[in-house]
Image (cartoon, coloured by chain):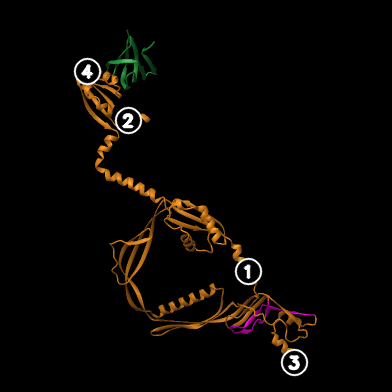
Amino acid sequence: MFADKLKFLQGYVKVRLTGYAPERFLNLCSNRNILIWNLEYREEHYEFCISLPGFRQLKPILRKTKTRLLILERFGLPFWMHRYRKRKIFFFGILLCSVSLYVMSLFIWNIQVEGNLHRTDSAIIKFLEEHDIYHGILKSRLDCAALEELLRSEYDDVIWASAKIQGTRLIIEIQENLATNQERKADIDDAPSDLIAQKDGEIYSIFTRRGTPYVEKGTKVQAGDMLVEGKLPIYNDSGEIVNYQYCPADADILAVTEYSYDERFSMTFEDKVFTGNSKKSYQLGLFGKLLRLPFGKNAFQHCDKVTTELPLKLGESFYLPIVLYTEESKEYVLEKKKYTKQQAEALAEHKLAEFCKKLEQKGVQIIENSVMIVTEANVCTAAGTIRVIEPMGKRQATSQGELAPEAPTDGGTALEERTGLKTQQEEQSSNESD
Amino acid sequence: MYGAVIVTATGKSEVLIENYKGILEYTNEKIRLQTKGCQVEVAGSCLLIEYYTNDEMKITGSIHRIVYDP
């Protein structure tokens, strides 16, 4: 095997030997240690293989034995090089390509962040850039262990971080501590707070968990009215308020409210009519910079542009710093058109349906819809009100000033104590009247 | 004995001859070699010298006889 490789590297020829004393020629060759192999006898002549250095020593032997050689075939690297001597650039290109491929593989071309729920990819990548870890960094300059340490120390809520290099991609996996986020939320919730009405309406149902309710079913409220106060009165044995206990009010309150709907649009509109002409232009992104290729310039007055981004990559994770952008411009002409009555009504209904859908997505139940659609010569109007049942209650911090009760109360009724429906003022006034 | 010819035959298709002195005759049917003290004749058909150097030669083909002539 090795001998075959050596023969190929040295080069060898297959020759035909004719003449007066071929046997003497063969003996002389062996005397001078010239290797000959695959020696065959054909009619009146011999054929054999001989290495190129051996072939060059044959001249005196040929003269001595009066034999002649005819080269039949040439094998090996020296002849191959000679045959392709005019394709140096081609081989140089192959070499250059492999070298550049190797050099490119020394850099990080893609950073991928996984497992982040609260922090966005771009925020983390920006943070990395501030600490000298960017797209195009040398792989050897990257210390994954230090990067993991950096992520953990910088972000409190990152409890686990892993950085690994796969091909030319840096993959960062993090695990965020969801418990701390919940705790923070709980902190806010612990502060004493009231629930107030955020808009006018009529209470549909109220279910209080904590706090003193100020309204009951059927109460009409206005924006800003107190619904549930985060303040619990504490009575002594004689029924006097001795102190207040503050807490975050918590209640499920549903209220019937109204949404006014007023949508009008012109009967005439400008419509895009595509002419069918389209042009493609190409852009090249090299190392994050954009190069516009000279051909395919845009010459349309009005057009829609669709840009497709094609990052070049080898295999799964070897992203090259080259991005090809294809921008397709589709020409259109603006035409003035007018809706027919049916079209306008359909459009208005569609818009109303969209509005209702949005409301329902907010957890609102629609109970009455009294919107009228009127089409006139130039304008289509849809106006009216939509009655809905929706969650009510906006959180507001409790004012903690009045710790001691101003007037003693003589034993409010059990119901009043339990539900606390009456405000303090009402209680006072009832006492006075008593 | 120093310098005596060594003939190693493997089956009937391969013969290795060491310590030969020269080729006297070579055709497809017969190869005659000069060695110390005698001549060795390998007869057969389709004989081919796979390689030969100063003191060693390998013959392949279908070998019928190996004859020592004094």
Q: Are marks 4 and 2 on the same chain?
A: yes
Q: Please name the amino acid that badge 1 sits on.
A: Ala
Residue corresponding to mark 4: A21
Q: Which circle, 1 or 3, is nearer the viewer?
A: 1
Q: Circle 2 marks a residue in which chain?
A: A
Mark with earlier residue (1, 3): 1
Q: Is residue A225 magenta?
A: yes
- Could you tell me how far apart the alpha carbons at marks 4 and 2 are, in whole angstroms? 28 Å
Mark with earlier residue (1, 2): 2
| Colour chain A is painted in | orange
Residue corresponding to mark 2: A7
Query: How many discs appear?
Result: 4
Instruction: Work out which quarter of the rendered image holds the C terminus of chain A and state it.
Output: bottom right
Q: Secondary structure at mark 1?
A: helix
> Residue A80: x percent and y percent?
28, 37
Q: To which quarter of the image does residue A426 belong?
A: bottom right
- Give, as a single range, the part of the protein colored magenta: A211-236
Q: Secondary structure at mark 4?
A: loop
Mark with earlier residue (4, 3): 4
Q: Circle 3 marks a residue in which chain?
A: A
Numbered badge on residue A433: 3
Q: Are marks 1 and 2 on the same chain?
A: yes
